[in-house]
Image (cartoon, helix red, strand yellow):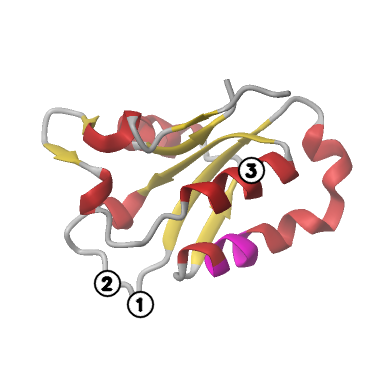
Amino acid sequence: MAVFRLFSKVAEIAHFGEYFNMSVADLPIQIDWAQIARFCQERGIRKLSLFGSVLRSDFAPRRSDVDVLAEFEPGVLKRVGFQYFGYGEELAAIIGSKVDFCSRLHPLILSRVKAQLFPLYEHA
C-alpha cells in the first residue's frame, strides 16, 4: 500500500516567508482531508498545494478562485488526456469554491509563490 502523508497536522502552522503565518483553521475554505487524499490518489497527484489569494486577507469566496498547484507522479500526465481539464471542476466540488487548477507555473511566477505554497496533500 502506498504511503501518503496528509498535511493536516504539518500545515497546522505553515510559515510563508517572514510576513505571515497561516494555520489550517485560518483558511477561508473548508478542507475535507479524506476527499482531498482520495482525489489525489485516484489521479496520480503526489503533491497538492494552495497559493495566491486564498492565503491572503483579500480572498472573497464569491468572486475569488482558489489557485491550486498539483505535482503529478512521473509519467501520469502522458496518459491522462482530456480528463486533466476536468480536475479543476472536480476539486471545486470538493472545496466549494471555483478552482484554478494547474500543474505548471512559469518559472518567474513559481519563484514568487514557492515560499507561499500551502500543502494540502503529499504522497511520501
Q: Nearer the viewer, mark 2 or mark 3?
A: 3
Give the residues in magenta.
Answer: 88-93
Which secondary structure lies at badge 1? loop
> What secondary structure predominates along the stretch shown in magenta?
helix
Q: Which residue bears the numbered disc 3?
A: 40
Q: Amino acid at mark 3?
A: Cys
* Residue 84 x, y percent position in the rendering: 74, 54
Q: Quick one: 91 or 41, which is closer to the camera?
A: 41
Q: Tell me, yes or no, whether the two marked residues, 2 and 1, touch with CB atoms within 8 Å.
A: yes
Q: Amino acid at mark 1?
A: Arg
Q: Residue at x 52, y 43 (%)?
A: 69
Q: Tell me, yes or no, whether the two marked residues, 1 and 3, touch with CB atoms within 8 Å.
A: no
Which secondary structure lies at badge 3? helix
Q: CA distance from mark 1 to mark 3?
A: 26 Å
Which residue is at the far bottom? Answer: 62
The local crowd at label 2, few if under 14, some if 14 to 19, many if 20 or more residues have their Cα within 10 Å, is few
Q: CA distance from mark 2 to mark 3?
A: 26 Å
* Residue 73 x, y percent position in the rendering: 71, 28
For the C terminus, give its image quadrant: top right
The local crowd at label 1, few if under 14, some if 14 to 19, many if 20 or more residues have their Cα within 10 Å, is few
Q: In the rendered view, does 76 fall on the left or right side of 57?
A: right
Which secondary structure lies at badge 2? loop
Q: Residue at x 48, y 70 (%)?
A: 98
* Residue 4 x, y percent position in the rendering: 58, 27
Q: Amino acid at mark 2?
A: Ala
Q: Which residue bears the numbered disc 2?
A: 60
